[in-house]
Amino acid sequence: MTVLRTEPRLADPDGFYAALMEAHRDLDEAASRRLDARLVILLANHIGDDAVLREAIALARAAGGGGAAPDAER
């Protein structure tokens, strides 16, 4: 049973993307990776459901190691 919601739910996905890119501005690669890791941990804590988080990890991993988002590979 799938518990992870993958349908688009962001009211302003472009705005979110812009805010995410702005958060990375002027960071070197190591600092950018730390920011991403902190963001993942904060959001995982907010979600709080182990099954959902494990499913998200599996889907992200299955998307490939090229760094592209799942939709970008279609």
Image (cartoon, rainbow, N blue to C red):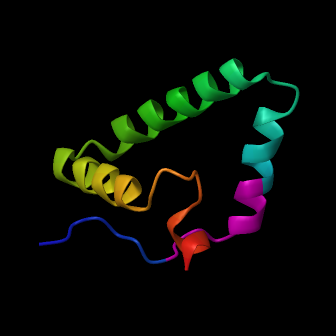
**Residue ID at (33%, 46%):** 47
- In-image side of 44 versus 22 (left or right): left
Give, as a single range, the part of the protein colored magenta.
8-17
In this view, the residue farthest toward the right is 26
Q: Position of residue 62 (x, y in %)?
A: 35, 60
Given residues 73 and 37, the one toward you in this image is 73
Above or below residue 74? Residue 26 is: above
Residue at x 52% of width, y 76% of height: 8
> Residue 3: x and y, percent?
21, 66
Of residues 66 and 51, the one nearer the viewer is: 66
Q: Dividing the image into 4 quarters, which one contains the C terminus?
A: bottom right
Tell me, yes or no, whether the highlighted magenta stretch contains residue 12. Answer: yes
**Left or right relative to 46: residue 69:** right
Quadrant of residue 11 within the rendered picture = bottom right
Q: Which residue occupies 88% across, 26% down?
A: 26
Residue 40 x/y as whole percent: 47, 37
Residue 21: x and y in percent read: 78, 45
Q: Residue at x 44, y 77 (%)?
A: 7
Q: How many marks?
A: 0
> Residue 38 versus residue 45: which sits nearer the camera?
38
| Residue 74, magenta (yes or no) | no
Whether residue 43 is situated above or below residue 10 in the rendered picture: above
Question: Where does the N terminus fall, quadrant-wise?
Answer: bottom left
